[in-house]
Image (cartoon, grey):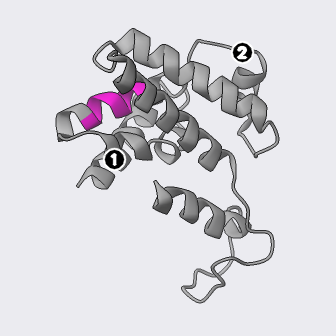
Amino acid sequence: MYGAILGDIIGSPYEFDRGKKTKDFQFFDKGAEFTDDSVMTIAVAEALMKARADGVIEDEAATKDLIIDAMHKWGHRYPDAGYGGRFYYWLRDNSREPYNSFGNGSAMRVAAAGWLFDDLETTRKVARWTAEVTHNHPEGVKGAEATASAIFM
């Protein structure tokens, strides 16, 4: 969790930089700040911890509802964090329906699924659920599952 959020902050000044790739850069350079990826990482972590505490983590629909609720809560708390266009409209409209995204947002917010569970099967299943609330395109789901699996390992 720390790594995901620190990586987001440290990389934020370079997020859209298409210049020379280098390992020589300042960790907390001017303009380094959290982005939508940190906000949604926290939202997903909060929802999954609540699902475990409430004993509903095995219930897909209940867990997805908690994820959506947390995403809306945190997204409305930080509305200018840099969300992509489709996610921003999903958030603004308080939508509860996915929009078939195959972008990387589902992978960027999934760290808690790799951290919270004791086996790879559960990690991948819950990672899929965290993706499917918005990024229900197969590529969006694969990105979340792959990232959570790497964190678990």
Res. 28 image quadrant:
bottom right
- Taking the image as shown, residue 112 lies to the left or right of residue 109, namely left
Residue that badge 1 annotates: 115
Disc 1 residue crowd, few under 14, some 14–19, many 20+, Cα 10 Å: some
Question: 75 or 55, which is in the foreground?
Answer: 55
Q: In terms of secondary structure, where does tag 2 sit?
A: loop
Mark with earlier residue (1, 2): 2
103 to 1, vertically: above or below: above
Picture quarter with the C terminus: bottom left
Range of magenta residues:
123-130
Residue that badge 2 annotates: 94
Question: 99 or 44, which is in the foreground?
Answer: 44
At 60% from the left edge and 12% from the top edge, which residue is drawn? 96
- The reply to whether residue 137 is in sight is no
Q: Where is residue 135 in the image (x, y as percent from the top left)?
A: 51, 28
Q: Is the magenta stretch mostly helix, strand or loop?
A: helix
Q: Where is residue 78 in the image (x, y as percent from the top left)?
A: 77, 39
Disc 1 marks a residue whose amino acid type is Trp
